[in-house]
Image (spheres, helix red, strand yellow):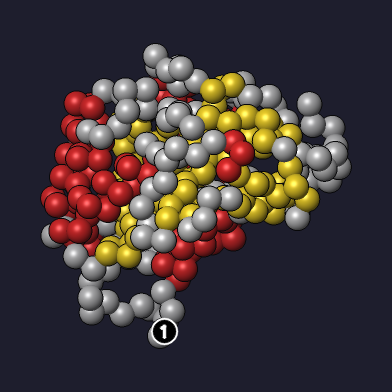
Amino acid sequence: MSTRSVLLGVTAVGLAATVGVGAQVFRGGTDTVLLSVTVTDASQNLVRGLDRTDFLVFEDNVPQELTLFSPDQQPVSLCMLIDSSTSMDEKLMVAQEAAIGFARRLGKNDVAQIVDFNNEIQIRQPFTNDVALLEKAIRAVRAGGSTSLYNALYSQISDMRRVRAKSTDEIRRQAIVVLSDGEDTTSLVNYEDVLDVAKRSEVSVYAISLRAKDATPRRTGFNEADFVLRTLSQVTGGRIFFVTNVAQLPDIYRQISDELANQYVMGYQSKNQKRDGAWRTIALRVIQPGTVARTKSGYFGPTAGRE
């Protein structure tokens, strides 16, 4: 059994053991397309107080009817993915304190895991809602090694996707918050692999790209890691933050925490009855003037023979 297989198995057990921790969960059917939706105004302030009639959803330009809607906060399973490569050495202490502050803002029904990565992936703490355990795990992270960003993303998205598939009757939002300060140098999987697994998952990717002001990408005029993180966040309905000073991290983590705590959860049953496994685009509109809704860009439809 490979190292990655072992790590994935450990994480799956951790989430399965905590997925129902005291939560009032939102229930849906296996054919329901679920959306975690963030709404902001022109100043990027979060907009609350909307109801079902304020939203219009389209799949491949065909209007859909919302059959599920919750304006209330739904529990989240969160993977905190921390770059622990050698380049993070001088920044790690501040990054750890910011991540601890983030963990302390989790809701009582939320669960989180702590994973750090360099050229290897280390699960410091499986999913739990015990803040003390999360803090201990974050403080245990040490810098060293190279950067296998794609391996880490692929591993954790795949893991969360697999666990999600085992429990289709309960809605628990899934998100990864990844902090990295460098381009990938040692991954075995490539960008296309990561993008594909992300598009097949229910995981929202929030990326924090930490760069020195004078950083120079390996390819002139192009930073591949930033491109990958930006694309993943756009496709999955998450968000990317570009940071040039580690002191900005506490505020960035606060913004992500606030967003996760103020999302709408909604769903619809697609009018497209084809089982061709094709990609279907999603467009969400808000009737409220001056507001914008953000969610995942689409999903792969069911295939023939799917139960």
Left or right of 201 on screen, residue 273: right
Query: Which residue of the protein is positioned furthest toward the front in this rendering?
Result: 289
Where in the figure is residue 93, as x and y percent of width and height? 13, 50
Report x, y in % for residue 148.
40, 56
Instruction: Say if residue 196 shows up in the picture.
Output: no
Question: What residue is shown at x 85% (from left), y 39% (from top)?
Answer: 273
Q: At numbered mark 1, what does the secondary structure look like: helix, strand or loop?
A: loop
**The residue positioned farthest toward the bottom in the image shown:** 220
Q: Label 1 is placed on what type of residue?
A: Gly
- Can residue 46 be seen in the rendering of this structure? yes
In the image, 37 versus 207, the foreground residue is: 37
Mark 1 Cα-neighbour bin, 10 Å: few <14, some 14–19, many ≥20: few
The residue shown at (20%, 50%) is 250
| Residue at position x 59%, y 60% in the image | 192
Say which quadrant the C terminus sits in: top right
Q: Residue furthest top?
A: 22
Residue 137's place in the image compared with 259, above or below, is above
- Vertical arrangement, residue 116 with respect to residue 234, above or below: above
- Relative image position of residue 186 (x, y in whole percent): 41, 61
The residue that disc 1 covers is 221
Residue drawn at 41 percent across, 74 percent down: 223
Q: Quadrant of residue 136?
A: top left
254 left or right of 304 in image: left
